[in-house]
Structure formats: C-alpha cells, structure tokens
Amino acid sequence: MARSTGGGRPPTLEQVAEFAGVSRATVSRVINAVPTVDPSIRENVERAIAAIGYVPNIAARSLVNRRTDSVALVISEPGSRHYDADFLNRIFTDPYFGRLTAGAQEVLRPQGVHLVIIPADAPAHHQVLRYLRQGHVDGVLLISSHVADPLPRQVTDLHVPAVLSARPGQPIPISFVDTDQRAGARLAAEHLLARGRRRVATIAGPQDMPAGEDRLSGFRSALAAHGIHDVPAVPGDFTQASGEAAARDLLARHPDVDGLFVASDLMAVGALRTLAELGKRVPEDIAVVGFDDSSAALACRPQLTTIRQPVEEMAGEMARLLLASIREPGHLARSVIFNSTLVERESA
Amino acid sequence: MARSTGGGRPPTLEQVAEFAGVSRATVSRVINAVPTVDPSIRENVERAIAAIGYVPNIAARSLVNRRTDSVALVISEPGSRHYDADFLNRIFTDPYFGRLTAGAQEVLRPQGVHLVIIPADAPAHHQVLRYLRQGHVDGVLLISSHVADPLPRQVTDLHVPAVLSARPGQPIPISFVDTDQRAGARLAAEHLLARGRRRVATIAGPQDMPAGEDRLSGFRSALAAHGIHDVPAVPGDFTQASGEAAARDLLARHPDVDGLFVASDLMAVGALRTLAELGKRVPEDIAVVGFDDSSAALACRPQLTTIRQPVEEMAGEMARLLLASIREPGHLARSVIFNSTLVERESA
DNA sequence: GGGGGCAGAGAGAGCGCTCTCCGGGTGCTA
DNA sequence: TAGCACCCGGAGAGCGCTCTCTCTGCCCCC
C-alpha cells in the first residue's frame, strides 16, 4: 500500500502502467471497465493499482470527459434581509432539507454520483454561480421556492443542467418537480368538512407565490363544490408571526369559525398560539389543518393534522431528471407533478 | 454576452487570447491578477473576457495547480444501525450544524474558497473517501463526535489536509478544535448548586462520544468537590425524543430531584415537555440546565439556561487551521481548545 | 497453406490551463 | 550615441487522463 515516496505526488496512470508492464491505455481500460481486456492482464493491472495505491486524478479525467460525477444540491434563499446565520439556522432546523437530501442520495448513490450541499443565501449567490460555472459539478438540484428568487433563471443561463424543486416563479425553460398544491388544499377542505365543520376559513400564503396562490384557490374551489362559497381568507407570509397575527385578525372578524386551513405549518403553529391565548380549544372549538408536515407539526401541541408532500420521492425524481439531462444533452425540460396526502394528528 | 455558438463548448483561454490579440499567457496573467501586465492590455483582455463570456475551466486549472479552491465540510456518522434518512433528519434538525457552517463560511468566503457540505453516514464512508482522494477539494473540515468513528483516521491516511471538530477518539496526528467539555459541565453543576439545588441528576449523552462522556464525568466531579456523590444519571442519544424518555425514566425512579443537568439542549427540550406533563414547574420544582445554547433553548418555554460553546468561532478556527495546512504543506497538527460559558435564562 | 477477420494492446494527440524561460522593446546612464 | 538593465509579453512544455487510430498476432475457413 505504498503511496509513492513520502510527501511526493500521488501516483499516476503512467506509473501503474510501468509497474504492470503495459501501456497507459490499458490501465485506463481496466479502470473504466472496458470489456476488451484480457483477464490475466486485467488482473495484473489491478494488482499494480493496489500495490501502488493509485487513484485517478479527477481533474485530469474531467478535463477530458467533461464530467465530474458529482452534482450540487443548492439551497437558495433570495431575501437580502436575512443574515447568513439565520438562513443556515433555518436550513439546519427544517427536516424538509434532510428529506430532500435523503431522496436525492437514494438515486444518486447507486449511480456513483457524489452529492454536495451548497447553501446559497443572497450574498453568496454570486460565488455559487461561479462555482457552478467553473464546472465543479455536472448539474444542479436547485431548491428555491420564492417567486422573486433570481437564481433559477441565472442557473439556466449558465447552461448547466438543472432541475428545480417547484414550479418556477417566472416561466423559464427548466425541468422541475412539484406537488399538486390545489389537490393538497382540497384534501384539507374535505377533511374539515368530514369533521363536520361548516364555518371554515383559511390563513393563506402570499398570493405572489405559486404555492400560496394555489393552496388558496384549491381550498376555495373544493369548498365551492360542496356549496360553501363564503370562505374568509387572511393572507400571511408563511412565517409563524404572520400566522399569529392572521389568526387574531380572522377571529376578530369571524368569531364563529370552527374549521381553519393554514397554508403552512409554521403559520399554523402561530395560529395555534393565538387560539390558545383566545381560549379556543383545538380541535374541539376549531379544527386546524396545516400544510407541509414540517417538524413544527410534530413539535407543537396539539400536533398538527397537515398535508404531507412526498418530499423524498420528489427529490428522487429530481435526481433522475437531472441525470437524464446530464447524460442526454439536448434533453427537453420536463416537469413531474406529485400528489400529497393528509396526515391526521390531533388538531383536526 | 455571447457564449460561444449554441450548445458548443464553453469558450477557452485560447479564444479570448485570439479575440484580444494577445497570447494565452497574457490572458492567464490577467485572470490571475499578475501585476506585471500593462494596464491597457489588461483592460483590453478584460473586455474580451466579458465579450466572450469566458470562465476558466476548473479541471484544466487544477490539473496544473493541484488546487480546487474548495473545501468539504464532512459530517460523519459511524453507526451502521442508522438509516440514511434518520441520519439526515438528525443533521437537518440540529442547529449545531448550521452554526458550524456559518462559522466556517465566515472565514472561507472572503478567501474565495467554496464550501461544500457532505453528509457521511457509515454506508457512504467509502464513497466520501473516494471523493476526497480524487481531489475534488483541497481539504476537509471533519465533523465527527463518536469515539469509534473510523473516518478521522481514514481521512488522515489519505494525506488530505483535514481538521477535526473534536478531540479524536484515538490519538491520531490531526489538527482539531474542541471545547473543554468538563469545564462546561462544571459550570452547570455550580449553577445548580448556587440555586440551592442539592438533589441533582443528569440526563447524559451517549457514553461512546467524548462529549457525552466528558460532560457526565465533569458534572460528577464538580459535584463531588462539593460533597455530592450520589448523582443519578440516565443516558440519552442527544435527540429530543430520548430526552423525553430519559426524563420520564429518571423521575419515576427519583421523584424528588430538584436540579437537572441535560447534556444537550435538544434533550433538555424533550425533558421540559415531560416535566410539563408530570406537572412539575420549571424552575420552581426542578431547575434545568441544558448544553449547547442551540436555537431550541430559546424556542422552548421556559427558555433554557444552558452552556454555550462558541461553535461559530470554533468552526472559524477550524477553517483557519485548514487553510494554513493547505497553504503550508508540512504544517504540523495543532489543536485549539475553547472555553464555554453559562447563559442564564429562565429554566435555572 | 494462405488470406481474411477480429480481438486486443500500444502510440499519440489532445483536453484547457499555468508557468518557466526567452526575447524584444524601452528608457536610462555613461 | 552606444550599452545595458529592466519590464512585459510570447512560446512551449507539460499537468494526468481518455480515446481514436493503428498495428500485431492468432484463429478460422476455404
């Protein structure tokens, strides 16, 4: 297992070839599992590789193939008002990203493709784009859920294979994976109805985000199908604080609400806090359904009934789409839409 | 901003040189900010670069320099009993890793060094080692807290510059950064005593991790110095759920406990939940001190009094040590030990 | 037994960049 | 005005790998 002498350079193909008494090309064939190599020579070369402790130099290899066999999972945050530390704290506090990573790994690992995670808050966007342009990776799984995020467009402009984690805010030619948000909202509506709630209302997401918009319209149209047309809605911005405020606002205007759909778990947790303050029991007085099945849904009391998206499967599909577009250049942008399910816990 | 025609190859140095009417070498000098270039030529070349949309090919560059200007943050998990998904869930649920990343970024970003995060559960160790050996990165920030973790040794055997996040389980020649865990636990013990608590107990961390071990022994020896020798201890695994269970277990056996040291905030939050369920008031009936000063310490009620490690500063120091050993090969392994402090909030 | 076919190994030309030499031009000094 | 530094740009040799093309040699068939 002698790595070449001391602090010297790592061994090269050339040295393996010399050691094994064959040419560079043959060693290369062995390493790349080209079948037209005589078994005895193959074995001989393999012994030489082991003896010398040879590892291919990835720079030299990818200079020729233009492949690195690794892809990046870029987690983007457009907001400029956030500090780096806040952003990272949010990432490393939300199990969503762990599920995403697990789903992608499941597909990439068996293919021998490395996954590296890159947090990209707004001030770092420039550096991340540089990283991608330089060709460190073959493609990008881009996690970005804000409409105003410029990164998806910038990444597609790079002509680096990329797949987005949600329908892009603006129409750009990029593959993406998403859930049917409207259908998810319908599940929530039907669950509330099944619980006998009729005076239902919603705390919506921002109406300039696809997710916010679709969850509201899906909820309303599901209720309309059951003859309920008057559905109070107060918008929030997906933060816990906005959920608290929205709930306060809503109950001030509609004190008799008995069923509430909140467009994100984080806002739902805020709403629960308000409801507790107002002395409303959940689910007895008001049934609450969240959205996301985030860790907040489990951490709060009562635990949230919520709409779960198949995040792992989605991430796996993202990885598959990405590999396809890496391996078949000229591959057209495609999108895949998943269904979500209702997870019943205590709040409704 | 014309990137070379259509789906063709990205522009090369050569093309920029031709466009600007200079040699490759000069373009290279401009890009690498070599001072001995005439300003007018420099400007001319810069215009050409912008016009053509040139970006250096990192593979070609690092084939020559043997530098990639990026480092990996590898988060290791030795246990083979854990599934990938569990492991990732733990990472993306524990704010510790976010603080670590933020601290490292703070140092690396101004240096133009990219940081990529690589989760490494046991089954992936092999692949991660391959990634490192291939030379994708210049060095490794290795996060590993289990004594039995083989990764630190394997990484040092690779002769890739590396810095470890804690004292290595076995003595291996690697730089590391750590806090004085025992001293931290002593702070907790003395705080509980100062609060008049005498029937103290602890929810410990896993005893196969130096951190778990040191926090327990430090806590015990501090109490012993005050004549308290009988200290009930129940081990957890640093997760919230284990904290809940451990607290239940502990109070069933020692219902009169009035002071509790929990070896991590996450477990402490779990313990608080159990205490609330059992009708114990905190801090009146039981004073609770956590460890880590994670965001969970602020999010829970009552807010946790806890031991704060300067995680960001530690990660920054790790990054500095790593850069030093990348830039000065033959650099000797060094270690830096930080102090922790007690953050007094509501729970004790 | 000779020729065609084919399996399988080697030679060699790059991939795009950096960096060491060199050499030409400029300006200063004697 | 000749000589000489010195400054700066160019030429060219690789870095370690892949891959096409070439060539050798063996087998098979007529």
Image (cartoon, coloured by chain):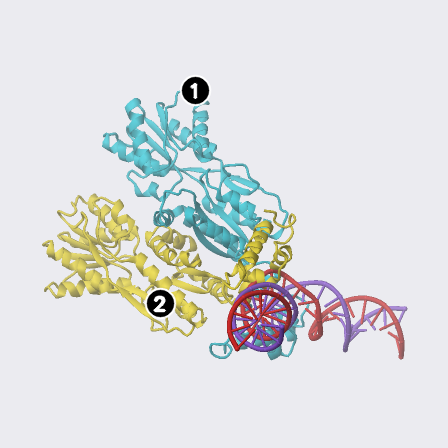
Chain colours: A cyan, B yellow, C red, D purple
The answer to whether any part of residue B246 appears in the image is yes
Q: How crowded is mark 1: few (under 14 residues within 10 Å), some or many (20 or more)?
A: few
Is residue B33 left or right of B242 when viewed as pictured?
right
Q: Residue A342, position in %: x, y?
A: 41, 36
Residue named by callout 1: A227
Mark 1: which secondary structure?
A: loop
Is residue A228 left or right of B43 when viewed as pictured?
left
The answer to whether any part of residue B144 appears in the image is no
Residue named by callout 2: B148
Q: Quadrant of residue A31?
A: bottom right
| Cα–Cα gap, marks 1 and 2 | 63 Å
Q: Mark 1 lies on which chain?
A: A
Q: Mark 1 belongs to which amino acid?
A: Gly
Query: In the image, what residue occupies the spot 40% across and 70% down?
Result: B153
Residue A71 lies, with reference to residue A10, above or below; the image says above
Residue B259 lies, with reference to residue C26, above or below; the image says above
Q: Mark 2 lies on which chain?
A: B
Q: Residue B42, position in %: x, y?
A: 55, 57
Query: In the image, what residue occupies the spot 27% across and 59% down?
Result: B205
Query: In the image, what residue occupies the spot 55% across and 40% down?
Result: A335
Q: Which of A215 and A234 is in front in this view?
A: A234
Q: Residue B295, position in %: x, y?
A: 29, 49
Asked if marks 1 and 2 touch (Cβ < 8 Å), the reply is: no
Q: Mark 2 belongs to which amino acid?
A: Ala
